[in-house]
Amino acid sequence: MLPRAQDSKGNVRKMPEKIVIIGAGQAGGQAAQSLRSGGFEGTITLIGDEAQAPYQRPPLSKKYLMGEMDVDRIELKPRTFYSDQNIDLRLKTRTDSIDREAKTVTLATGETLPYDKLVLATGSRVRELPIPGANLPQVFYLRTIDDVDGIRAAMADGAKVAIIGGGYIGLEVAAVALKLGAQVTVVEMADRVMNRVVAPAISDFFQKLHRDAGVDLRLNAGVTKIIEAGGKVSAVECNDGTEVPADIVVIGVGILPNQEIAEAAGLDVNDGIVVDEFGVTSDENICAAGDCTCLPSELVGRRIRLESVQNAIDQAKTVANTLLGNKKPYNEVPWFWSDQYDIKLQIAGLSFGYDQSVVRGNPDDKSFAVFYLKDGAIIAVDAINAVPEFMIGKRLVAAAAKIDPTVLSDMSVSMKEMMQK
């Protein structure tokens, strides 16, 4: 018999006894924690294919790569937390399939686990570059602790490092590699860095930042192959025929949602596992959270997929509440950040579809912000070493505030005053 509890209105509801979570990343780890802290007393099985307990991924391309943080510091919780909380943590374990009718999952070992409710927190994987030479041992992607350990071991002082992709990951790796004494070249096929997520003013700032630091930044340059010599990487060939000498190559050209197991089970997918505002999939007994999901967004008025720690954490909390019978719709303002050298970029909201951008502050001072407007309303803000602009800007985005652009750019008007406009 399933345990019973009361919801906020005093109605008696059934609670699941067995919850299985597939994916032991940020979302899966958070879902397990939130279920226990929310009072769930049933069985929780948390399944992950990596050898590590749930850990933070953002430090991988920053302080962990730099050697300033070790594994213990990036784990979400100490290993003892899971045994203390009676969470069955199964690492180095792959889930092969889901049987929705029988309500079971089958592991690669052949073991079958029953569930009352299932959480898919399968995350994402790197987008691979299908070019000759991409399988050489000195070619790396950056997604896991093992990836970074390999990069760090190969990045000897003075090594020639070619980075394919001028997004967050590529630029963060470039900044760290330079600090570690490497010679760094970044090859980006677009005409500016981070072109999908920031305005030209932000791209221009980071391009100058990296070039001034000593990075050879090549824009409008595609990569046709990685050249081999003696079984090792020797160079990267660009589409204009030029070659970039390299001892190691790091590829950062985006990620893809891990939706295959959901699709095979017949769940709705669309660039991610389709969920509603409560994190429920097309099967009422299955929820999903994190990078793997395609979720509704009131902010932009359509479905989106978010690749961020904030989304993984907040969506996992939403799913836990749903499973605990305290359904609360997810409608958070997404936020992101990137650390490069002594610069912190903080982003709130989603800027795509903007029709006006407003610069606040002077980029030469290395502290400024860009606000994005659509039909006069603030939809996003990018802040460079500008905490008030980020913190209050996030609230302005949530309120869809309409502020005169001349006021928004006026540094004599404080951000606190903006809230009163």
Image (tube, helix red, strand yellow):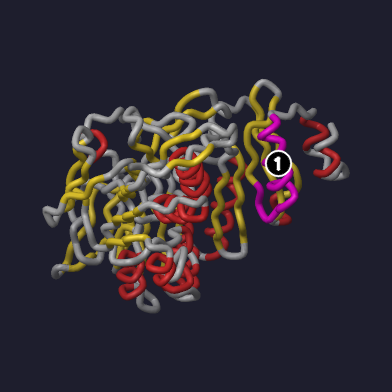
Q: Amino acid at mark 1?
A: Gly
326, above or below 33, in the image: above
Quarter of the image that includes the C terminus? top right
| Image position of 402 (left or right of 307) | right
Find the magenta span and give its range.
Answer: 383-399
- Residue drawn at 56 percent across, 41 percent down: 334
Residue drawn at x 62%, y 64% is: 342
Main SS of the magenta segment? helix
Q: Position of residue 66 (x, y in %)?
A: 46, 72
Residue 187, position in %: x, y?
A: 39, 52
Q: Is residue 21 above or below residue 71?
A: above
- Disc 1 element: helix
Q: Nearer the viewer, residue 8 or 341?
A: 8
7 sits to left or right of 368:
left
Q: Position of residue 94 (x, y in %)?
A: 21, 54
At horizontal 30% and vertical 46% (from top left) the residue drawn is: 127
User: Label 1, on which residue?
Assistant: 393
Give yes or no for residue 252 being in the magenta stretch: no
Residue at point 48%, 73% (across, down): 69
Q: Where residue 284 sits in the image (x, y, percent)?
A: 35, 30
Q: Please identify the residue farthest to the right as the structure is shown.
A: 412
Residue sitting at the far bottom? 157
Q: Nearer the viewer, residue 138 or 24?
A: 24
Q: Is residue 246 visible?
A: no
